[in-house]
Image (cartoon, coloured by chain):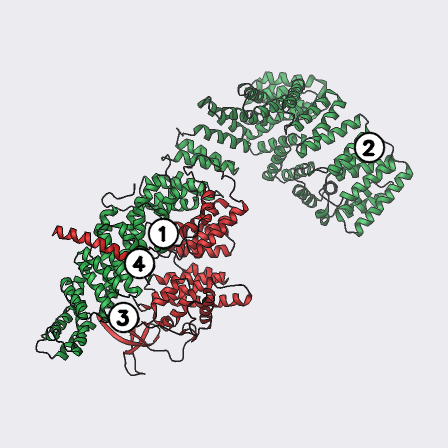
């Protein structure tokens, strides 16, 4: 596996292990901000992209050298520079780029939520592929999506303590927007729709609400069960919230929560949005419930940490101190729980990691089990 | 219950943890197609062919070449050859492995381990050895082999994770969850990629669900919610979650149940996504096979995933679709934890996708949820949808009453009436019929449909005697009757409330209203003790002020002026609405004036001015203070005080009390000593100058009107001033008094257009004042002259309704009657005349006019007998109104003639001609002529 010792984008040396997280993130961010990406500027001479194109039943090993409209230009792998053939993209059934990158270190960065680092590692890999992402069934689109999501998260977690920092964040959002827009062209994959919505999210983040609304309007309104459902309504909620239409934002966020909770990329954010709306509408009990849910369901994440802070604040202010009253008596109230008490217990407990490492001797246990299993097998035979 | 009886997770794991690879590998073995004869080939050629076949993923072909090389060189001892054979043995093992020949592969791998104890791929081979046992379902040796590998070799995380995953699979196949959990934890923390981490998380979750350790499940949730992950497709995980969710739901642990249910993918989604993912995996496997073997374990992993997934899809096909029940449980759980927006949306979705009766139930619950969310617009929308879709449905009664209650809370009374009236029509045995009727009655009261209130509430009391709403209904019947001025009947209802339900919340109010009824009926002797009793029983009540006010009125009526003043003062010391407050205050000073307590008036009004409650009439109070000062001999001071009032409040053109001060000031200057008058006028002129200078136009206009009363004003000066006032451009700044002058002047000068505009402005700016009444009457007359009856009726109707007790209202009714007759609408005309006759205060010239109108209505409908009776009553009862009496004689005679009763007609007219009252009148001449005519006809 190839290990990059320098950042491919700006040729900065990777920081040594043991750097603090923030230094690391900043280093990664500077890479992202300095990038002269392929999707914003056309390089003078684009690099040839080695790929395998499946055309009907034939697989051709080629180097992609450019495209014009819906025509791809290619030459056989190792062919003479300058000579190329063309083919309509619609005639290609599948494409596979030769992609080499250090996937283990990217995975590690993603797991450790070092988004800028992950994005910086992926961006130079995916940038040259962007013009070709609409080739059906290619392996570049998912990777580009990973890169864009990492960039988005990097932008979201960037420090914004002053104007300069905020300007950098805006710039990063803009670049991320461009990347998502490029991915959205890959109409063969469901990622296309998701990328389009993420692009809208970037516009909202930089305050370009009009454009965001226009692009969301152009997107398909999904049905419950669709992959993009949660994201669509989360993005809609975000825009509505930016417009201070809290009630609408609440309804959209609730749709996201109710019909699409199986996505870590949207569900906690949608929950937070509902909690925020509850707070804005002074529905403290419901805000508490949702923060409690986030803290319980996403332990060890930044979401849980924020939720715990919010819960502490609600408790400190005594906003849910009184017993909750209900205006109409005749509705179901089978629930008998003291959520304030549960919240206090949660806050008093340590924020546990998702899963403890087990210290048992696996090899010894396996040998013991092996003996039993082997005896049984022998008996059976 | 959601759980599927046919598949429990135990049976599923036995099935699912089995050796999938065998099927998957069988598919790989079919890919070979490069079989050639190799015995005649040279070793170099065989090596090349093996290498080519491997690069194409043609393991079967490669195996043949590689076996040939083993046959040729396997027993060589030359170090170089042995070393070259290392890769041959490794690849041969791989080829057997990937073509499903596990015992052959095991044999080759075992040989490798013996021959190459320090070989570069010894650890990897050791893992494959374990895999061979596993795929041969020899789980004991497999586990032992993996354990050996873990102990003996330094492994990279990637390989270590493979071993943990394989060991987990062995334990799962043996149904040894306790043993599997530590291995899965190791896998979870070791795996360098999302895919295997997620696999571990999913299996751990399943294990924890089996053990009902939900807290541990929650800690894994971030790793389960990964789109396209194993967790998103695992049938075992979904089934386990359904079962655990059911158990928690049954234990009423709704919050935990909800979170567990929310892990479950809907059956439809699961099926679709699993199939999609299978396609992706198959393409990926094909790619890896085509790309050849840098790392065959990648291919192995994908093949294992394919095998697992195919089994998942197969298992899923055997599970009945649980989506509706799942959504229902989730929605109910959200409802239980008061997340009503989520439950509303889920129930609405359920309503869309479920069949009956679930769809009905879902819409009802969606409504129940929406009711808990403010604003209630969506609740009403869903409620209406329910009532429209399921008229008379299972929950129709509950929905309709709740919709009615919401409308009632929002004070949308017409909607309350329409929804609940319809509900009672659709569901005649409505289970909340009494409540429906009560609400309809109450809403009707709010809409001032008092007769409807009485009808509905009596209907309720008759249909549901002794129902809990009976005291309330009886009270509101009383209120409706009272507001309908049926005080006698109302009193009966209030008495009922007081006597039958002494503990009712309405008792106190009924006691008070009972007194009001007697008060309104002028039964002051009985009203007074009732009010005093009320004050004794409820001395702190909010109605005490009003009670004192009525007691003040009663004392006034009895002529006990001192007591009246005392009671009015007590009323204004208490909480009382502003209209009553002003009534008491000014009635009080009126009486004090009669008592000549001017000092008292000054003090009381000064206090009123200081209190300055919202809605207080300060100019009126100033008027009283000025007047009292005058009566105490302070002429100069009084005039100055009144002028101060004018200066202070005259700028507000809408202030009505200021006109009273102006009139008072004018009147007093005429009675004051000449030097005082002179000084007062001089001061007023200065005020006018200042107002003009400061562009205080409303004040200036008012003062110009005052100038019209300047002593010794010449006609020319008066004309100039009037001309200056009566100009259309003054309308926006003119006070009511000024506009009244403008209207009179314009009317006198026949400047109808200006008069109309002034009248319209008065109506617009002083809508419910007496000024508006006159203006409307003017406009009505203009409209009648122009035969614009529609407009005339509009104005007269307003006068009749808004100023119902005024004499103008009676006049309006009379005019309306006449107009309706002109339009041949006799019923409406008769109603107007009847209304006039029902008000005792309007007795006088209006009554014979109204009786005549009724006679006309009957006559024009050819009911001559009835008509003649009305005419007869006029000259019998109201002979003092000669014109009406004369007209009545003539009209009656005509009716009798129509009935061919000429003798009676002549008799009637003779009676008229013999009376002295009509001598010299036109009617007398007419009567004589008709006598002759009827004589001729009768002969």
The residue at which mark 2 appears reads as: B628
Identify the element where label 1 is drawn.
loop
Secondary structure beneath label 3: helix
**Residue that numbered label 4 is attached to:** B187
Give percent across and percent down for residue B701. Answer: 77, 46
User: Residue at label 3?
Assistant: A91
Q: Are marks 4 and 1 in contact (CB under 8 Å)?
A: no
Q: Residues within 10 Å of mark 4 (few under 14, many from 20)?
A: many
Q: Residue at x 58, y 18 (%)?
A: B902
Chain letter belonging to callout 4: B
Chain letter of the red region: A
Answer with left or right where residue A215 lies relative to residue B40. Answer: right
Indicate which disc, 4 or 2, sits on the residue closer to the N terminus.
Answer: 4
**Residue A310: x %, y % from top left:** 49, 51
Depth-wise, is mark 2 or mark 1 nearer the camera?
1
The quarter of the picture where the N terminus of chain B appears is top left
């Amino acid at each position: 596996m190839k290990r990059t010792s320098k950042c491919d984008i700006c040729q900065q040396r990777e920081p040594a292990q043991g750097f603090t997280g923030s230094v690391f993130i900043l280093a990664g961010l500077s890479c992202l901000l300095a990038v002269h990406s392929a999707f914003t500027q056309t390089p003078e001479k684009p690099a040839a992209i080695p790929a395998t194109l499946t055309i009907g039943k034939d697989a051709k090993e080629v180097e992609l050298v450019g495209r014009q409209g819906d025509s791809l230009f290619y030459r056989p792998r190792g062919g003479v520079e300058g000579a190329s053939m063309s083919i309509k993209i619609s005639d290609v059934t599948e494409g596979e780029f030769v992609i080499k990158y250090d996937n283990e270190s990217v995975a590690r960065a993603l797991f450790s939520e070092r988004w800028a680092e992950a994005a910086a590692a992926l961006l130079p890999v995916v940038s040259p592929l962007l013009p070709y992402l609409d080739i059906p069934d290619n392996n570049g689109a998912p990777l580009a999506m990973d890169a864009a999501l990492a960039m988005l998260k990097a932008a979201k977690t960037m420090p914004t303590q002053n104007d300069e920092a905020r300007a950098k964040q805006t710039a990063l959002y803009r670049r991320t927007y461009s990347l998502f827009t490029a991915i959205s062209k890959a109409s063969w994959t469901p990622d296309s729709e998701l990328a389009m919505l993420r692009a809208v999210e970037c516009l909202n983040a930089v305050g370009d609400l009009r454009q965001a609304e226009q692009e969301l309007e152009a997107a398909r309104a999904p049905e419950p069960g669709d992959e993009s459902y949660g994201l669509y309504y989360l993005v809609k909620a975000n825009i509505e919230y930016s417009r201070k239409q809290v009630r609408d934002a609440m309804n959209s966020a609730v749709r996201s929560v109710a019909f699409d909770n199986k996505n870590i990329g949207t569900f906690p954010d949608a929950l937070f949005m509902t909690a925020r709306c509850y707070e804005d509408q002074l529905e403290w009990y419901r805000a508490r419930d949702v923060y409690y849910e986030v803290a319980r369901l996403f332990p060890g994440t930044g979401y849980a940490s924020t939720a715990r802070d919010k819960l502490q604040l609600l408790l400190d202010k005594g906003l849910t101190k009184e017993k909750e009253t209900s205006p109409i008596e005749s509705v179901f109230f089978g629930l008998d729980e003291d959520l304030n008490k549960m919240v206090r217990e949660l806050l008093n407990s340590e924020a546990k990691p998702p899963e403890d490492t087990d210290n048992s001797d696996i090899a010894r246990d396996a040998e013991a089990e092996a003996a039993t299993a082997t005896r049984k097998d022998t008996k059976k035979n | 219950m959601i759980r599927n009886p046919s598949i429990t997770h135990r049976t599923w794991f036995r099935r699912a943890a089995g050796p999938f690879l065998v099927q998957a590998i069988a598919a790989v073995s079919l890919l070979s197609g490069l079989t050639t004869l190799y015995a005649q080939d040279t070793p170099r050629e065989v090596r090349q062919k093996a290498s080519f076949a491997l690069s194409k993923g043609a393991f079967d072909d490669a195996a043949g070449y590689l076996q040939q090389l083993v046959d040729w060189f396997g027993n060589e001892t030359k170090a170089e050859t042995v070393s070259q054979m290392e890769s041959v043995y490794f690849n041969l093992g791989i080829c057997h492995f990937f073509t499903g020949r596990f015992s052959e592969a095991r044999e080759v791998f075992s040989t490798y381990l013996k021959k190459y104890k320090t070989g570069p791929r010894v650890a990897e081979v050791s893992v494959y050895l374990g895999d061979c046992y596993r795929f041969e379902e020899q789980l004991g040796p497999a586990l032992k082999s993996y354990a050996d590998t873990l102990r003996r070799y330094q492994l990279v995380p990637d390989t270590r994770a493979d071993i943990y995953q394989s060991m987990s699979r062995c334990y799962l196949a043996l149904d040894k969850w306790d043993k599997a959990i530590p291995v899965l934890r190791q896998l979870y923390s070791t795996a360098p990629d999302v895919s295997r981490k997620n696999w571990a998380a999913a299996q751990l979750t399943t294990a924890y669900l089996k053990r009902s350790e939900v807290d541990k499940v929650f800690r894994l949730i971030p790793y389960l919610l990964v789109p396209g992950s194993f967790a998103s497709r695992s049938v075992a995980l979904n089934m386990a979650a359904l079962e655990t969710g059911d158990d928690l739901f049954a234990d009423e642990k709704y919050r935990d149940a909800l979170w567990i249910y929310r892990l479950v993918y809907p059956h439809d989604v699961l099926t679709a996504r699993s199939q999609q993912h299978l396609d992706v995996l198959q393409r990926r496997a094909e790619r890896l096979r085509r790309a050849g073997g840098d790392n065959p374990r990648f291919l192995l992993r994908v093949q294992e995933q394919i095998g697992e997934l195919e089994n998942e899809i197969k298992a899923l096909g055997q599970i009945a679709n649980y989506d509706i029940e799942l959504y229902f449980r989730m929605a109910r759980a959200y409802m239980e934890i008061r997340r009503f927006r989520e439950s509303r949306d889920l129930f609405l979705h359920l309503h869309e996708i479920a069949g009956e009766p679930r769809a009905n139930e879902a819409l009802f619950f969606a409504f129940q949820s929406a009711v808990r969310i403010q604003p209630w617009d969506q609740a009403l929308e869903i409620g209406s949808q329910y009532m429209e879709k399921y008229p008379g449905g299972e929950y129709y009664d509950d929905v309709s009453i709740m919709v009615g209650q919401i409308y009632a809370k929002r004070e949308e009374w017409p909607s309350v009436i329409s929804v609940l009236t319809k509900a009672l029509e659709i569901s005649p045995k409505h289970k909340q019929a009494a409540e429906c009727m009560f609400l309809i009655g109450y809403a009707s009261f709010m809409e001032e449909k008092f007769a409807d209130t009485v009808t509905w509430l009596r209907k309720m009391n008759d249909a549901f005697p002794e129902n809990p709403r009976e005291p309330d209904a009886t009270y509101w019947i009383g209120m409706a009757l009272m507001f309908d001025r049926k005080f006698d009947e109302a009193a009966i209802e209030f008495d009922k409330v007081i006597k039958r339900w002494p503990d009712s919340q309405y008792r106190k109010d009924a006691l008070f209203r009972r007194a009001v009824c007697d008060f309104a009926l002028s039964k002051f002797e009985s009203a007074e003790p009732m009010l005093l009793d009320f004050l004794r029983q409820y001395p702190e009540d909010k109605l005490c002020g009003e009670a004192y006010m009525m007691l003040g009125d009663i004392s006034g009526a009895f002529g006990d002026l001192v007591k009246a003043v005392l009671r009015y003062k007590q009323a204004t010391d208490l909480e009382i609405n502003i209209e009553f407050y002003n009534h008491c205050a000014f009635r009080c000073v009126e009486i004090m004036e009669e008592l000549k307590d001017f000092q008292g008036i000054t003090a009381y009004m000064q206090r009123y001015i200081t209190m300055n409650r919202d809605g207080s009439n300060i100019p009126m109070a100033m008027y009283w203070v000025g007047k009292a000062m005058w009566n105490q001999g302070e002429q100069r001071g009084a005039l100055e005080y009144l002028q101060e009032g004018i200066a202070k409040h005259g700028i507000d053109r809408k202030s009505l009390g200021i006109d009273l001060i102006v009139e008072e000031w004018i009147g007093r200057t005429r009675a004051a000593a000449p030097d005082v008058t002179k000084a007062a006028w001089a001061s007023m002129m200065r005020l006018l100058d200042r107002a003009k200078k400061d562009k205080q136009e409303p004040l200036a206009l008012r003062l110009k009107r005052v100038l019209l009363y300047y002593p010794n004003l010449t006609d020319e000066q008066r004309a100039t001033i009037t001309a200056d006032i009566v100009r259309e451009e003054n309308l926006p700044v003119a006070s009511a008094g000024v506009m009244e002058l403008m209207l009179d002047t314009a009317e006198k000068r026949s400047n109808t257009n200006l008069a109309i505009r002034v009248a319209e402005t008065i109506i617009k700016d002083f809508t419910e004042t007496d000024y508006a009444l006159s203006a409307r009457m003017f406009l009505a007359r203009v409209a009648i002259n122009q035969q614009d009856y529609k407009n005339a009726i509009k104005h007269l109707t307003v006068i009749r309704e808004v100023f119902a007790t005024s004499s103008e209202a009676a006049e309006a009714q009379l005019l309306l009657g006449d107009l309706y007759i002109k339009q041949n609408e006799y019923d409406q005309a008769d109603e107007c005349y009847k209304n006039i006759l029902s008000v005792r205060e309007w007795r006088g010239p209006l009554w014979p006019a109204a009786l005549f109108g009724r006679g006309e209505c009957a006559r024009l409908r050819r009911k001559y007998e009835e008509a003649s009776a009305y005419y007869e009553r006029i000259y019998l009862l109201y002979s003092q109104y000669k014109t009406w009496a004369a007209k009545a004689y003539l009209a009656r005679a005509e009716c009798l003639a129509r009935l061919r009763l000429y003798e009676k007609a002549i008799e009637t007219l003779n009676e008229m001609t013999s009376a002295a009252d009509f001598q010299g009148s036109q009617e007398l001449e007419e009567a004589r002529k008709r006598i002759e005519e009827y004589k001729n006809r009768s002969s």
